[in-house]
Amino acid sequence: MSLDETDRRILKVLQRKGRISNADLSEAVNLSPSACHRRVQRLESDGYVRDYVALLDARKMKLPTTVFVEITLQGQADETLDAFEKAVARIPDVLECHLMAGTADYILKVVAENTEDFARIHRQHLTRLPGVAQMQSSFALRTVFKTTALPV
């Protein structure tokens, strides 16, 4: 299924306001409530809308420190990659893990309370990841902007 302009308008609104009522959404995109509901159901069933979530404030959750960790593995065999990916997915402090092209094999986004907490995460979890040859951590000084909205 391809997206038309109305689908795109619906997706733009849903990315900003996931809890919007169907009545308000239909008004925002200039559709009848029933037509809007059908389109949202189709966008969900076709996988364009994966889920609806609450986005938490990291500072209020006492996790204001963001660290990006570059990981280089000892090898590139499928078993090495699979073992690493399974292990890193079990670390609750790791929010994202990206397989990269370039100097590092992976980049992790890690949240922590402070540098001491990151040292604990590093010691208890990151250093125990299988297949790691090298690790380099960079602390974010400030988040300039952050969005979860994809360009539609």
Image (cartoon, helix red, strand yellow):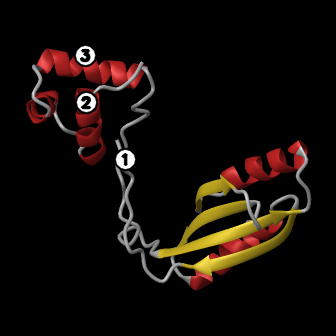
The reply to whether residue 71 is visible in this rendering is yes
Gap between marks 2 and 1 measured at Cα: 13 Å
Q: Please name the residue shown 77% across and 67% down the image.
A: 103
Reading the image, the residue beneath label 3 is: 38
Q: Is residue 64 left or right of residue 43?
A: right
| Circle 3 or circle 2, nearest the eye | 2
Q: Please name the residue shown 66% across and 57% down the image.
A: 91
Reading the image, the residue beneath label 2 is: 5
Mark 3 or mark 1, which is nearer the start of the sequence?
3
- Considering the image in quadrants, where does the N terminus appear? top left
Determine whether label 1 and label 3 are within 8 Å by CB.
Answer: no
Reading the image, the residue beneath label 1 is: 151
Quarter of the figure with residue 136: bottom right
How many residues crowd around disc 3 within 10 Å: few (fewer than 14), some, or many (20 or more)?
A: few
Comparing 110 with 75, the one in front is 75
| Circle 1 or circle 3, nearest the eye | 1
